[in-house]
Every structure is written in C-alpha cells, then in structure tokens.
Image (spheres, rainbow, N blue to C red):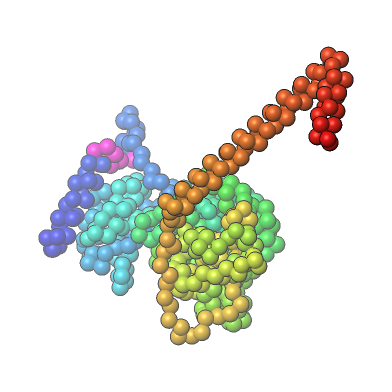
Amino acid sequence: MLPQQQQNQAAALMQQAAALHSMYPMPPPPHHHLLGAAPPQQIEPILTGNLPPGFDTSTCRSVYVGNIHVQVTDAFLREIFQSVGLVDGCKLIRKEKSSYGFVDYYERRSAALAISTLNGRQIFGQPIRVNWAYASGQREDTTDHFNIFVGDLSPEVTDSALFAFFSGYSSSCSDARVMWDQKTGRSRGYGFVSFRNQQDAQIAINGLNGQWLGNRQIRCNWATKGANGGEDQQTSDMKSTADITNNFTENGKDKANIDAPENNTQYRTVYVGNLAHEVTQDVLHHFFHALGAGALEEVRVQHGKGFGFVKYTNHAEAALAIQMGNGRILGGKPIKCSWGNKPTPAGTTSVPLPPPAAPSLPAAADLLAYQRAIALNRMASTQALMQAQQTAVGMSVTNQAMYDGTFQNVGASQQQQQQLMYY
C-alpha cells in the first residue's frame, strides 16, 4: 500500500494521462484494421539530445527515467507509468542524491506517450526526465579517439543533429554529444565530437569553425581535459564506455604527463592573449563573468602588453573558460585563451570575486563640463565661419572692381592710404 502523499501524486498524474488518453486512445487489436476501422492516431515525442547518433526508436518499447526523487519506490514508479499503458516490467536503481530506472511497455506507442506526457513532471518537487532507453553498447567506444570541443550551439541542436553535421564533413566522425543541464533538461550550448582519425579532426576544426549550425555560428577547437561541465545523466546511468568529457587533452589524446596543465588540477589560471589596447581589467572582468564558466577569483591585465590572466576557483571551470572564451571577439579582436604557466600552490584558500559593478553614469559636474565644452566648440566654429564669410565678401568686392575696370582706382586709393600712413 502506497503512502497517502504518493497516492495523491500518482492520482494527479493518472488524471493528466487519462485526459491525454481521450485524445490518443489505446490502439485496437492488430486485426482491427481489417474490419474497416481507421488506424489509431499516433503521437511521437520530440527527440532529445542524449540519444546515440543513428538510434532507431521505431521498435523501442522501453523508456529511461532519470532524476527520480529518493522517496520514490518501485511500486510508486510502476503505478505512475502504468497510467499511460500496460507495463511489462519496471526497475528502479537507487542512488544517494537521485535515482533512475527503466520501464518496459508491451506497446511502443505507450512508451512514446510516456515520454510525451511524463517528461518533466514533478514528483516530490523534483522533475523526472523520461526518454527512450538504449544500451550502452549502442555508442561506439571513443576512448582512443580524437575529440574536439564545439561551442555556441543553438538550443535546438541535439546529439543527432550535431553528429549529422560533422559526419557529413568527415566519415571518421564516431560520436557527438551535446551537454545538457540535468535539472532543466536544456542544452548548455556546447558539446563534443569524436573522430577516429586525428587529421580528420583537425580538418573539421579548420573547416567548420565559424560555420552556421541552426541559428548560430559554432566555434571548434581541440577539447581540453577537465572541460566537462557534467556528463549527461542518462549516459552516466547507462554506464557508457566512453566518457569523452573526462579523457581529453589539448590534442584530443590522453597523455601520461600528469604535470601538464590540462592534467594537473592545481592549474586554475587562464592566460588571455591578443587583447586590444582599450581592454581594461574591468572590461575583462565583465567579459569572463558574462561567459558563465564559473566563479572568478582574480583578474589581471598587463597594460600595454596585450595580455592578461583570469583565475578561477577550480581547474574544471578554468578548462571550460578556455574552451568557451578562445576565439571570441573582445575590443574588435579575437582573444586567445590557454593555460597559465604557473599552478596554484596546494592549500591556497579560494576567495571568489564579487560580480563586476554595473557601468556608472557620469557625475552632474562632469556632464555640465562636457556640455560647456560642446557649447564653446560651437561658438568657435560659428566665429570661424563668420570670418570666412567676411573674407569671401572682401575678395568678391575686389574681383568685381577688377571686372568693372575700376581696379586702378582702387589701387590708387590704397596707395594714398599707404602714403598717409608713411607721413
């Protein structure tokens, strides 16, 4: 017997599912169409981004359920998903913070209806994630493959769309993953693409960097170890054999040198090069704060030298900032981001910087002085114009005298004046 709170939530979900059943009734027996009845109306869920490239859902009858509240039991989970179709099997895997599970239906259409109606539903204040279930072996093992980072992705770009885009450019493309926010279910705006061949990966970086995918121009670069930002939960739960976000180095292959910046968690500083002359410390602070890679600890600009440093509170945030910031335009120039050359000493206390202050408005006295300067400039311009007009009038009179033949008289008059001045 389920607790009263769980019964109430299950009842509410069942009422919502019942309303959808009236719109999409359960299919009749397979021979029903022979009697002349119209085929049942079909409903298809929108494919999300964490399905393997090329995954075929046409015969799938199982769904994955993620972000399940720890209070949910097997019986409660089965009762909720039983509301949209006859359940063949249900399995709940418990974890400390949030559990996950799998539900098998007798009909594929019931699984599709469960994804469409139950995905994002709140159970104990926690939205569950429902998607097609797939085996971990359906993704190719990319442990030894060459991996690139792809930034500035449009929200609608999924794993399949990202894979189709890069595989059309190179046949050695083996996998593509968009990073998704576990709580909101939305894209984080970046992902990773794997290649079997290093040269093909480099060609893809050179050829596709800045190209349009969806509504945005993407940015491509070699993936850096530590720039994970969190693996999508479904892939983690299904124990995928390739965690591309935790096995990267700057050339896409894992190195044995643990002292390299990409392998050493004590490196937390980002070198920022090719800075425009007008970029100040405040401007750089605003830029990396808006980037959203993590909490900033220190921002420095070497004035007149065209470079600076941005320090983060941990290694993973710095790695993500390198991937997201490299090549972006700041002050009219594309900046270059890489690891700083010095690690942070072990045991150093991390103190995040406060958010940058909003740009301040000019003081009243400064505004008055500015307005006065503008007025003086206008007066000077007016006087210069009047002098130019007077000069032009004098020249016009002289020219007219020359034209009328009276130039000699004018010259004589001027000579008399000069003689008077002499005496």
Residue at 51 percent of width and 84 percent of height: 345
User: Magenta segment, which residues?
Assistant: 21-30
Residue at 61 percent of width and 67 percent of height: 303
Image position of 282 (left or right of 417) = left
Name of the residue lying farthest toward the front: 423
Image position of 25 (left or right of 4) = right
Residue 94 vs residue 135, the one in the foreground: 94
Image position of 36 (left or right of 156) = left
24 w.r.t. 312: above or below: above
The C terminus - image quarter: top right
* Residue 67 rendering spot, x and y as whole percentages: 32, 62
- Residue 341 figure quarter: bottom right
* Residue 358 rendering spot, x and y as whole percentages: 42, 57
Residue at 22 percent of width and 60 percent of height: 124
Q: Within the magenta stretch, is there residue 23?
A: yes
Q: How many marks?
A: 0
Residue at 68 percent of width and 33 percent of height: 387
* Residue 394 rendering spot, x and y as whole percentages: 74, 26
The N terminus - image quarter: bottom left
Q: Within the magenta stretch, is there residue 196?
A: no
- Residue 391 figure quarter: top right
387 w.r.t. 51: above or below: above
Name of the residue lying farthest toward the top: 404
Determine if residue 328 is in view: no
Residue 104 vs residue 408, the one in the foreground: 408
Main SS class of the magenta portion in the image? loop
* Residue 400 rendering spot, x and y as whole percentages: 80, 18
Residue 301 vs residue 15, the one in the foreground: 301
